[in-house]
Amino acid sequence: MRIGVVSDTHDRQEAVAEAVRLLMEQHVELILHCGDIESPETVRVFKPIPTHFVFGNWDKDKSKLVTAIKEVGGTHYDSFGFLTLGDKRVAWVHSHERHQLRQLENADYFDYVFYGHTHVREQHRTGRTLVANPGALFRANPKTCIVLDLITGEIKPIIVPTKAPGNATPHAPTAALDDGTGSIIMPAVIPPTLPSGTLPAAPDTSPPAPPG
């Protein structure tokens, strides 16, 4: 089984449409969206493939996003999504709540944890868990998403070519660090220690059974 992972689409529908097309060429069976969707119009571009969304710090009107997600047959979570696909445990977050990502990464429970928010593609391993950021479809050069083959464990980056918008309005400051109001443009340093607490609760929506 192959799945696609995208993040930080920020209402860039042309880039999203191209990413969805490329992921369909890779025969993915579902997509995970790591947040910062922004608009219902962007959600609707994901209609061709079952998509599971979490919300990011730029997803201001969640009620409209939830309606659109239901319309296209997708699934929404809040800030934390979790699916068991075959024998693999997969979680994904936006990561603007930085302690949440660190908790998931260090839980020694998940096979894969995906996150967004930094607009920078990377991957690393912590114990049994492979942690990966698919990159972004806005304010990233190049724009990327990824494909995970759950059988082989291979993660393949997909470069998404798009035309530069003529009158793009910035969504976030161009500083290297997050000032609390927008997405991080450069990688953030996550504190090495984890606040005491438990893992985020699993979402109320029961995940669909994995494809046979």
Image: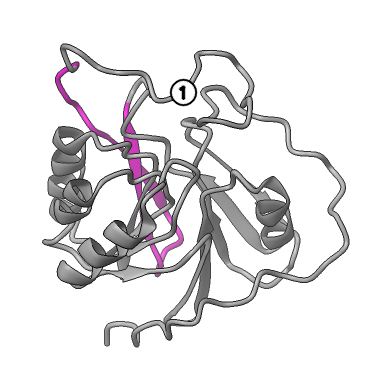
Label 1's element? Answer: loop
Answer with the quarter of the image where residue 18 lies. Answer: top left
Is 67 in front, or is 212?
Answer: 67
Residue 30 vs residue 203, the one in the foreground:
203
> What is the basis of the colouring in this image?
one colour
Residue numbers of the magenta segment: 143-164
Q: Is residue 86 above or below residue 65?
A: below
Judge by depth and name the residue closer to the eye, 10 or 24. Answer: 10
Q: Is residue 133 magenta?
A: no
Residue, disc 1: 172
Question: Can the viewer see residue 29 in this picture?
Answer: no
Q: State the quadrant of the N terminus.
A: bottom left
In front of the other: 193 or 11:
11
Left/right of residue 75 with respect to residue 16 in the rendered view: right
- Residue ID at (73%, 59%): 103
Residue 31 position in % (x across, y down) = 30, 60
Image position, residue 107 (x, y; %): 74, 67
